Image: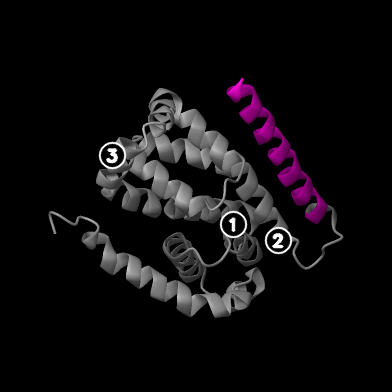
């Protein structure tokens, strides 16, 4: 095991691969409407159910986060839906990050082999919070792999999570609003959500370019 540290990851990665293989053929069923129909009727059970799906999504990476945030908009009044979805986003960003933190030895080994990656490490150490904020604001995908990489990079957890939630908040708010208006795609709220997402994308790209220069 000491000579092959990767063996520590063989079992959990194999388990994740099996989960993905099982869920992938059923991905068309993992829609906001289906999730809202499967959810318990009691409010607190519905909250626990949705948060557990956020945790599952962060580990198996087989269905889009937007389905969960839209489901929150269908299940709860908007203020509560937004609070639940932001909590779920924190859960989904934390679990892969912590897995990545556990694998930091692999990150250091990769740095030794690819010296150019030191520039990425230095950027994270210099302004890691800004980098995380811009990645989340831009909706960098796949987000779970981004979280794994940032966990391995060594950025402090609370700096990472705070910046990640702040960067994700506009898209989560828009997706939650979309969920509440999902049954009426021509409604004002639907197009407001689409407009917010488009504006956030343009803003994030503009900030990224400014930062690059």
Under circle 2, the secondary element is helix
| Residue that appears at 59% across and 24% down | 212
Residue beneath disc 2: 180
Q: Nearer the viewer, mark 1 or mark 3?
A: 3
- Image quarter in which the C terminus is found: top right
Residue at the front extreme, as displayed? 113
Instruction: Tell me which label, 3 or 2, sits earlier in the chain.
Output: 3
In the figure, is residue 161 to the left or right of 188?
A: left
Can you give x and y, in whole percent of width and height, for residue 74 in the image? 66, 65
In the figure, is residue 173 to the left or right of 187?
A: left
Membership of 44 in magenta stretch: no
Bin the neighbour count of mark 3 within 10 Å (Cα to Cα): few under 14, some 14-19, many 20 and up. Answer: some
Instruction: Tell me which label, 2 or 1, sits earlier in the chain.
Output: 1
Residue beneath disc 3: 108
| Residue that appears at 28% across and 49% down | 103
Spatial CA span between label 3 and label 2: 45 Å
For the magenta stretch, what is the residue range?
A: 190-213
Residue beneath disc 1: 81
Check whether the beta carbons of the residues at disc 3 and disc 2 lie within 8 A of each other: no
């Amino acid at each position: 095991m000491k000579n092959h540290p990767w063996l520590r990851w063989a079992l959990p990665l194999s388990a994740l691969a099996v989960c993905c293989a099982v869920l992938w053929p059923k991905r068309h069923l993992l829609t906001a409407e289906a999730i809202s129909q499967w959810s318990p009727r009691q409010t607190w059970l519905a909250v626990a159910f949705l948060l557990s799906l956020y945790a599952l999504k962060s580990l198996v990476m087989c269905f889009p986060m937007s389905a969960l945030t839209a489901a929150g908009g269908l299940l709860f009044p908007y203020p509560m839906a937004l609070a639940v979805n932001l909590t779920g986003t924190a859960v989904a960003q934390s679990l892969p990050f912590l897995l990545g933190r556990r694998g930091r030895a692999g990150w250091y080994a990769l740095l030794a082999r690819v010296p150019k990656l030191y520039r990425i490490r230095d950027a994270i150490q210099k302004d890691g919070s800004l980098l995380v904020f811009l990645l989340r604001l831009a909706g960098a995908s796949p987000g779970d792999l981004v979280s794994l990489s940032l966990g391995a990079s060594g950025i402090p957890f609370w700096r990472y999570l705070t910046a990640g939630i702040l960067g994700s908040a506009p898209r989560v708010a828009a997706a939650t609003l979309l969920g509440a208006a999902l049954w009426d795609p021509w409604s004002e709220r639907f197009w407001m959500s689409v407009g917010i997402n488009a504006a956030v994308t343009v803003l994030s790209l503009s900030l990224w370019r400014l930062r690059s220069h």
